[in-house]
Image: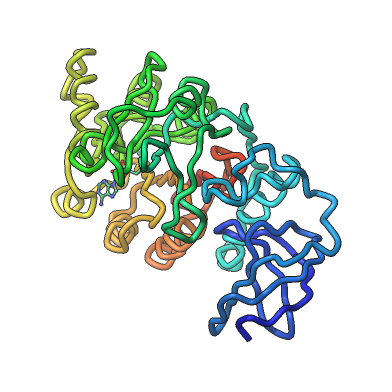
Amino acid sequence: MVGEKVQLRIEKMTVGGAGLGRHNGLVLFVDYAAPGDLLLVEITEEKKNLSFAKIVKILEPSPERIEAPCPYFGECGGCSWQHLSRNEQLKQKHNLIVDSFRELQKIQTFEIRPLLQSPKDLHYRNRIQVIAENGQWHFRKKHSHQLVAIQDCLLVEAPLRKTLEQSPSNIKSGVRYDLRLDRDSKVLVTALDENVELVGFSQVNRFQNDELIDHVIESLSQNGSGDLFEFYAGSGNFTFPILNKKNYNHIWAVEGSPALVRMAHDLIQQQNISSKKLSFHLGDVGQFLKTRWPKSQDVVFLDPPRIGAEESVIKTLGLSRPRQIVYLSCHPVTMARDLKRLLAIEKSYKIEFIQPFEMFPQTDHVETLASVTLD
Ligand SMILES: C[S@@+](CC[C@H](N)C(=O)[O-])C[C@H]1O[C@@H](n2cnc3c(N)ncnc32)[C@H](O)[C@@H]1O
């Protein structure tokens, strides 16, 4: 019952960041809990299959609990796992992956490789979004629109910390700002009220991004005659390194953000890249697939947003049967769903491996790479 206080032992961490415990058949999700904690919690929301609670008192702390390094932890909604030791963060992330792919493992067995740790556990982010209010930067509280004034963030790189430290001038109250580093580590501040399409996706952890690019390139197979279809390509984070290291007949890159495609076109022009080798298309992946299907000798690499790929995209991939599909994702649950849909359409596909990467230390987010090939 909402408002009821109960004792709870936390079993594990879950996607979304909360700890999970059970009480009288009720599965309770508790923010800022740690595996092994014995807690007094108050039930805050009850649903059919899952309910939520908040910590009233830590009765027995988990041995993996640590003092969070950031003074805003628990107030600011940015980090969910700063209270877990680094070893426990890595262990729990690996378990999240195993849990997310459990259903799929019942259809076919495949290797889940050990999680590759980020070279940096703090000061790794090169972009954040903050809200300006009364001449101060703010983050939002977890699950809330309430603001938390901040002057530092331990996740961001040094130049961004400097920006957060200073009282911002010329900013508009109530507006969300994108703060990011350019290639020369200069801070770019963009108000998102008028300029939303000027900023787009980029990998936030450049220290681990290099590792990710190497693994993607290594995973992509090549038989000499095929094309590569790269979907959700951003500004070409993977496209240009792939072009340099591999020799596909043609790379078809597709991305929906005009700002990112403009960046890619600029680089194509600067580097004088032949349109015979690479074409970078602005548009929706589903729409693109209505005009051109991968063939059996081609390879597909996709890196969709958290919501995963559209069902029609997966369906077309399953029906067109490229010989390899390499799938990168920042959400293991939607990735597992998409792979399950793919295997339902084309049963000959075999998952070669799942390789998780730690891109976002101190949070529950995890990046995962999978390679799927025709049997
Ligand atoms: C996770 S990001 C990956 C970007 C790129 N691979 C990188 O590493 O920088 C996903 C990208 O998909 C794009 N996107 C989302 N939905 C799309 C769609 N339906 N069609 C085309 N692009 C889309 C977003 O703009 C974003 O750039």
> Looking at this rendering, what residue extends furthest in the left direction?
291
Question: Is residue 227 shown to the viewer in this render?
Answer: no
Between 352 and 59, the one nearer to me in the picture: 59
Rendered location of residue 318, percent (x, y): 34, 59
Between 365 and 251, the one nearer to me in the picture: 365
- Quadrant hosting residue 263: top left
Q: Quadrant of ligand 1?
A: top left
Tell me if 355 is positioned left or right of 85 in this view. Answer: left
The colour style of the image is: rainbow
Rendered location of residue 283, percent (x, y): 17, 45
Note whether 160 is above or below 319 in the view shown: above
Q: Which residue is depicted at the point 20% across and 37% down? A: 195
Question: Is residue 359 shown to the viewer in this render?
Answer: yes
Note whether 208 is above or below 42 in the view shown: above
Tell me if 235 is positioned left or right of 147 in this view. Answer: left
Between 163 and 109, the one nearer to me in the picture: 163
Q: Which residue is depicted at the point 37% across and 66% down? A: 345
Note whether 100 is above or below 71 in the view shown: below
The quarter in which the N terminus is drawn is bottom right
Between 280 and 121, the one nearer to me in the picture: 121
